[in-house]
Amino acid sequence: MNIILFGPPGAGKGTQSKYLIKKLNAFQISTGDLLREEINKNSDIGKAIINDMNDGKFVTDDIVNKLIENLVFDPQKKNKLIFDGYPRSLKQAKNLEVLLKNSNQNIDLILYLNVNKEIILKRLEKRKIIENRSDDDADTIIRRYDIYMETTQPVLNFYSKNPNFREIDGSLEIDEITRKIDTFINV
Ligand code: AMP
């Protein structure tokens, strides 16, 4: 199965993708993790994105599209892809359609974890303490949430028409969300 986890920062995409990876013996494609890796390596991409990432702004479509390309075409990962944090723009969603088509794959499930701003704020303030992420301070959290909601609205409209689209209340406890996801993946 190829699955897209969609929802604002702090909705629980990372946690649920870790569950899905184990359960389906699949591979997580987290563009946030891939971008943070580039920053840690201090690569050219890392240098180009560090300010935008720290400000909670989106990285350009070209950069993220390039980062995921080889992973989608990796034969070992074929039909075992869990997208976490990608696509976040219509251009990325269209790019993914093309990549999947060219590698003979489909999206089997689009999970939208829907959570409101107050809950996200509380969760990400906690995560800041645990993970010490530089983009998890309160102002940046609010900015990232607002940017996410605004920018991803067209992506949500695009995917909500897909018959494989499922919405889940992301304010539920982790286990409850996992149980709901289980009902959709019937393996
Ligand atoms: P995340 O770990 O998914 O919350 O992403 C952290 C940050 O990485 C975001 O606030 C963006 O700056 C950047 N980022 C991650 N994925 C994408 C994407 N698909 N498109 C653009 N920027 C992204």
Image (cartoon, rainbow, N blue to C red):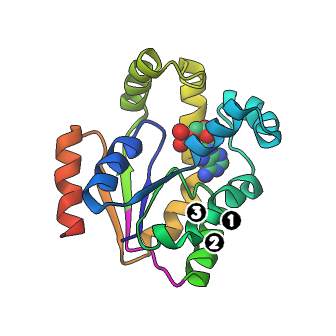
The first of marks 3 and 2 along the sequence is: 3
Q: Residues within 10 Å of mark 2 (few under 14, many from 20)?
A: some
Query: Quarter containing ligand 1?
Result: top right
Q: Quadrant of residue 96?
A: bottom right
Q: Is residue 22 left or right of residue 108?
A: left
For label 3, the SS is helix
Contact (Cβ within 8 Å) of mark 3 with mark 1: no
Kind of element beneath mark 2: helix
Marks 3 and 2, Cα distance to the nearest angstrom?
17 Å
Residue that appears at 76% across and 29% down: 51
**Residue 151 seen by the camera:** no
Q: Residue furthest top?
A: 129
Label 1's element?
helix
Residue type of the residue flagged with mark 2: Lys
Relative horizontal placement of residue 129, taking residue 183 as reference (left or right): right
The residue mark sitting in front, 3 or 1, is: 3
Give left or right: position of 97 versus 10.
right
Q: Using the image, determine if residue 30 lies above or below residue 136.
A: below
Residue type highlighted by circle 1: Lys
Q: Left or right: where does residue 100 sit relative to residue 185?
A: right
The verdict on label 1 being within 8 Å of ligand 1 is no
- Residue in view at x 23 percent, y 39 percent: 174
Beta carbon at label 3 within 8 Å of ligand 1: no
Question: Which residue was labeled with disc 2?
Answer: 94
The residue that disc 3 covers is: 71
Give the quadrant of residue 124.
top left
Residue 54: percent from the left, percent from the top? 68, 27
Say whether disc 3 or disc 1 marks the residue closer to the N-terminus.
Answer: 3
Amino acid type, label 3:
Leu
